[in-house]
Image (spheres, rainbow, N blue to C red):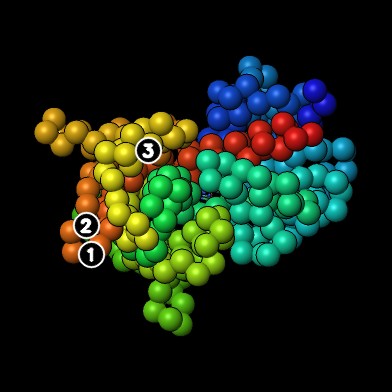
Amino acid sequence: MKKIKLAVVGATGMVGSTLLQVLEENKFPADEVYFFASAKSKGKKLQFNNKEYTVEELTETSFDRGIDIVLFSAGASTSKIYAPIAASKGCVVVDNSSAWRMDPEVPLVVPEVNPNDVEKHKGIIANPNCSTIQAVVALKPVHDLFGIKRVIFSTYQAVSGAGVAGYNDLKNGLEGQPPAKFPYPIANNCLPHIDDFLDNGYTKEEMKMVNETRKIMGLPNLKVTATTVRVPVFDCHSESINVECERPVDLDLLIKVLSESKGIVVQDDVKNKVYPMAISAKGKNEVFVGRIRKDESVENGINMWVVADNIRKGAATNTVQIAELLVHRM
Ligand code: 25A
Ligand code: L14
């Protein structure tokens, strides 16, 4: 196989450090690795595969060394500037930010759903929003079996989605301190407000779920709506997903197919109080699905409860899986 030179931008962040862990765990076949972050982290030491690396400051010349794949997790403003520079130097960028996701030239990929879209890249591939990734992993088997017609997402999102600052707001808030990142206390509270509000009354996070679900699933006209809520949980997003299908639903068949789907673990045994929970999904790469039942208020309706580690499958794990798809095609 070709020798791979890999770089990580934003290596010191919450997502970046998990990227390093997942790369190690998956034995990603990199022969050379480089780590970049902002000037603030320049010179910081990182351990990777039992070797010490020094973090470099990201600059316009960072990629002038024959790098094959760059994983970006440094926020949208950094990606807007530096991803095209990396691509122009011959790198393939896998970008974790919201900067490029809806660009028609940029594939938006969840390997369990649309793996072949990676082949359409022109230098940049986008990693979807965390809430969207776990949702489409669960929706794909439903769509293949019964055809999805309308989807309603209601999310219960962890503070780790907002990075170190979000984490600190919950930790400090539980000790009575005022928030620094969120507009109101998150301790003992639920905030129906993730990312900025738009003119249509929805938040950007809600519209990411709507638009990215359509793009990843290749269903541009899918009827879909979302309410996204920040809850006082450190790690893992939980979601209630209500689906109306085209065809009659066979629940036993659905549960069988979900159980056999790659990347999904079904936890659905309510008699024994078995259902997905944030505390059990933490640190895992899979999407956990349970409370699978009919919505009897409509024809062909289903309700599901879907939980995943937002920093793993919602960010780092999905990014590494995209990079693995690229390596297999090199
Ligand atoms: O705009 P977006 O796309 O919506 O993304 C906004 C934010 O979302 C996170 C990410 O935060 C990003 O900043 N994010 C991105 N994709 C995500 C996803 N899929 C996602 N969250 C969830 N799901 P993050 O904390 O994960 O990562 C921040 C990293 O970005 C580096 N960075 C920032 N600007 C950069 C840059 N790198 C290069 N060039 C730039 N211009 C940033 O590096 C970090 O690695 P750093 O050097 O700024 O951070 C150094 C160290 O400081 C610690 N730290 C930061 N804040 C605090 C802190 N420690 C204590 N308290 C703090 N308040 C960091 O942990 C790091 O060790
Ligand atoms: O668009 O604050 O990927 O929980 C994911 C985490 C946006 C913010 C993205 C959060 C980010 C979101």
**Among all residues in the image, which is located at the extreme left?**
271
Look at the numbered disc 3 and give the secondary structure of its residue: helix
**Is the residue under label 1 in contact with that under label 2 (CB below 8 Å)?**
yes
Residue topped by disc 2: 295
Q: Residues within 10 Å of mark 1 (few under 14, many from 20)?
A: few
Which label is found at residue 298? 1
Residue 40 visible at all: no
Residue in front for this viewpoint, 225 or 218: 218
Task: State how far apart marks 1 and 3 are (Cα).
Answer: 22 Å
Q: Residues within 10 Å of mark 2 (few under 14, many from 20)?
A: some
Residue topped by disc 3: 258
Q: Amino acid at mark 2?
A: Asp
Q: Earlier in the sequence, mark 3 or mark 2?
A: 3
The residue shown at (42%, 45%) is 141
Q: In the picture, residue 53 is in which quadrant?
A: top right
- Answer yes or no: disc 3 within 8 Å of ligand 1: no
Residue in front for this viewpoint, 97 or 313: 313
Q: Is residue 326 left or right of residue 216?
A: right
Q: Amino acid at mark 1?
A: Val
Look at the numbered disc 1 and give the secondary structure of its residue: loop
Q: Earlier in the sequence, mark 1 or mark 3?
A: 3
Task: State how far apart marks 2 and 1 are (Cα).
Answer: 6 Å
Q: Amino acid at mark 3?
A: Leu
Residue in front for this viewpoint, 124 or 31: 124
Residue 309 visible at all: yes
The residue shown at (67%, 64%) is 103
The residue shown at (55%, 23%) is 25
